Image: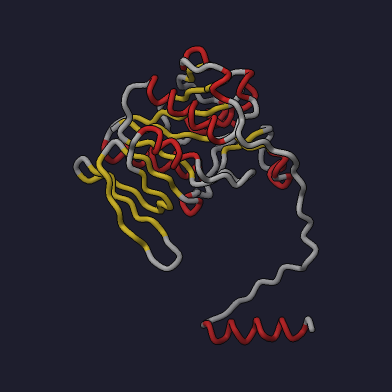
Amino acid sequence: MRIAVFVKPISINYFEKRKKYTKFEFFMNDPDRGAVIEAVKLVKNYGGEVNVFMIGNEAQLNVLKEALALGANSGILISDPIIENIDTLSKAKIIVAAIKKSKPYDVIIFGDTSIDTMHGQLGIIVADKLGLPHISNVVRIWNEDSKIVCEKRTEDKIITCEARMPMVAIVTVDLNPEYIPKTEEIESVNKPILKWDLKYLGLKPEELTNKIKLRNIERIVQNRERKFIYFNDYEELSEKIINIINQQK
């Protein structure tokens, strides 16, 4: 089984509290880490290899190395000065070109959203452009014969779906593991990392014109005090919420 996983580097500046945990300037998008670990589990159980792709630059290589430290077999850095600031549609075009440039994959896995910009359409767009079935909101994934079976979470139920390979799976942040490789584990990684540019992928700059442009980013200041409510049943919860509301009148 050949699996491709796409990961996104997130600037540490988006989450100041992370600075005390790492010396790197970028970290892996949390849902993508869950995607890498699920892919590694699949090949451990059923055989195969995991290739991790990232659109980025040399300064973000530690994110690819983290994926390799988690058990992926190889990494592909897609880097070009032209693609420093591109929108989701342009990223999808690059990913589709990268998939077509590679040997065929049985499963392509994405995290369900990027935690910095909260974009969550990339995996679905790629599946559509490749003409592949996709299953989103995945919280569990396994293989049965030539099919991939997934449990996906809805608001009030778990739905089990299946799709024949090749297919695209989009996993939720629920699969994000607490384990993050240590700095020395990431730095000591010695697995192959290939570097591709637009020319290698057969793409022209004019094909990647942004349709959506980021105008501004403002931090939201949390002024209200957070309250944690502990309860044994919903009746007790409702009473505590009512008491809090009455106290604020």
Residue 229: x, y in percent? 63, 75
Task: Give the image quarter of residue 146.
Answer: top left
Placement of 171 over or under 36, stated as above or below = below
Farthest-out residue, left: 145
Q: Is residue 233 above or below residue 17?
A: below
Q: Is residue 195 visible?
A: no
Q: Nearer the viewer, residue 113 or 181?
A: 113
* Residue 116: quadrant of the picture: top right
Q: Looking at the image, which residue is at 57% across and 38% down?
A: 28
- Residue 23 falls left or right of residue 179: right
Image coordinates of residue 16 in percent, x first then y, are 73, 44
Quadrant assignment for the C terminus:
bottom right
190 or 56, nearer to the observer: 56
Query: Which residue sits at x=51%, y=83%?
Result: 233
**Which of the colour schemes (rainbow, by chain, secondary structure, one colour) is used?**
secondary structure
The structure residue drawn at horizontal position 59% and vertical position 84%, both measured from the top left corner, is 238
Q: In the rendered view, tell whether residue 76 sits above or below residue 182.
A: above
User: In the rendering, at what x and y percent does residue 47 appear?
Assistant: 27, 34
Q: Nearer the viewer, residue 111 or 1?
A: 111
Q: How many marks?
A: 0
Residue occupying image coordinates x 38% and y 36%: 108
| Residue 67 shows in the view | yes
* Place of residue 188 in the rendered image (x, y in percent of width and height, measured from the top left): 54, 25
